[in-house]
Amino acid sequence: MESLKARGCCSAKQSEISGENSEALELYFSSCSKLDSYDWLREVSGSDIPEVVEVRFKNTRKGFYRNVNELRLKRGDIIAVEASPGHDIGIVTLAGEIVERQRAKTRNAKQEELKKVYRKAKEVDIDNWKEAISKEKDTMLRSRQMSNDLGLNMKIGDVEYQGDNTKAIFYYIADERVDFRQLIKVLAEAFRIRIEMRQIGARQEAGKIGGIGTCGRELCCSTFVTSFISVSTHAARVQEVALNPQKLAGQCGKLKCCLNYELAGYEDARRSFPKAGIPLRTVTGNANLLKTDVYRGIMWYGYEGGGGQALVPVPVERATEIMEMNRDGKLPDELIESSALKEEKKLDYTDGAGEESLTRFENSRTRKKKKKRRPPRNQQNKS
């Protein structure tokens, strides 16, 4: 079952999945597989015979297949689909109206010719599929040794067998172009199958290996990210992140994928901001932009010669107004008018209930009465 985790099979037994038990399917899809898709149109999808279904295989490989035989397919069904050559075994992740919307997100969605769904997987198909999966780890280790013996500057990161056990995809990473024609001959003779070499990048390799990021959580590429979009330093500049390569790079050595998560929000918020390179001219002196608070809409300026010690928070509207005055040849007295200055309120701690003290429920201790000290016995006897 360890080899099945790459396909998301980590919550139920394979024998339970292949049956028609709905409870087993629900248990199966309660797992945290990165290839799962959430069907947010499941309540409005009426037909039980979908025209197109989304099918997942291993790691980040997914595909869309046409249901030419008009089978009753639902999420979680194991099916046999068309491959070149032979057939492959996959798991349905989406079926219904949501599939066309999901397909529109992919590249060349209209030009792509969809392959066919042959049938629901039989018991024989699943047995052959499980047998092929059991060979993957041993095949990967042996293929690495073969590539080292041939002196090839490449690393084979993973192997995926086709469902009918007639073809294998070897995923490799290499910095330069590699001539692996001799390696293909050696692999074909050793394993007696068709060989396909597929190059992957550093991000895909990190997703296969997994790990913990600097945020303390599991890597995004090994949990939910399936399509890797290029990340540039422009995303860091827009979000006012320090351009430190050691902090911006992930475990793959590339820029972190999370730099793109909030990029669209920052770009939308910055549309109302004036250009950063234009200084604000006032009677007091010229002020240059030092930093910005994007979501609060505040630009922090410092006067020339001030050494950046006295920063003045200027709202975006005020900065735009001063630039328009400078174009007309006018100079305001200050960056912010004295009437517009407001004292900042100091935020003291308040609990959720709005009470003053956190110890209000504790019982106050009553003061004990001091007892009178008795004189020593010797003094009592003398008296």
Image: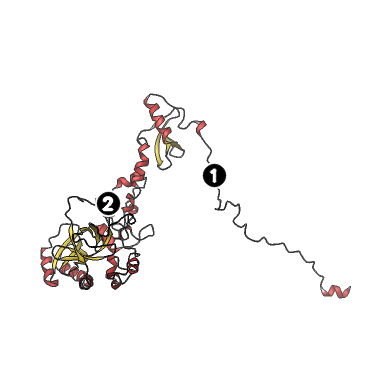
Crowdedness of circle 2 by 10 Å Cα count: few (<14), some, many (20+)?
A: few
Color encoding of the figure: secondary structure
Q: Are marks 1 and 2 in contact (CB under 8 Å)?
A: no
Residue 197 appears in the picture as rendered:
yes
Crowdedness of circle 1 by 10 Å Cα count: few (<14), some, many (20+)?
A: few
Q: Is residue 288 left or right of residue 377?
A: left
The residue lying furthest to the right in this view is 383
- In the rendered image, which residue does mark 1 sit on? 346
Which image quarter is the N terminus in?
bottom left
- In the figure, 263 relative to 79: above or below? above
Q: Is residue 162 left or right of residue 337?
A: left
Q: In percent of the image, x 41 and y 30: which residue is there?
A: 321
Q: Residue 131's spot in the image, x, y percent?
A: 21, 73
Q: Residue 261's spot in the image, x, y percent?
A: 34, 50
- In the rendered image, which residue does mark 2 sit on? 101
Number of marks in picture? 2
What amino acid is at disc 1?
Answer: Lys
Element at badge 1? loop
- In the figure, 35 relative to 146: above or below? above
Residue 304 appears in the picture as rendered:
no
Which image quarter is the C terminus in?
bottom right
Disc 1 or 2, which lies upstream in sequence? 2
Q: Is residue 45 left or right of residue 284?
A: left
User: What is the distance, in whole Å, between disc 1 and disc 2 at their CAs?
Assistant: 49 Å
- In the figure, 138 relative to 254: above or below? below
Element at badge 2? helix
- In the figure, 78 relative to 230: above or below? below
Label for residue 19? none
In the figure, residue 96 lies in which quadrant? Answer: bottom left
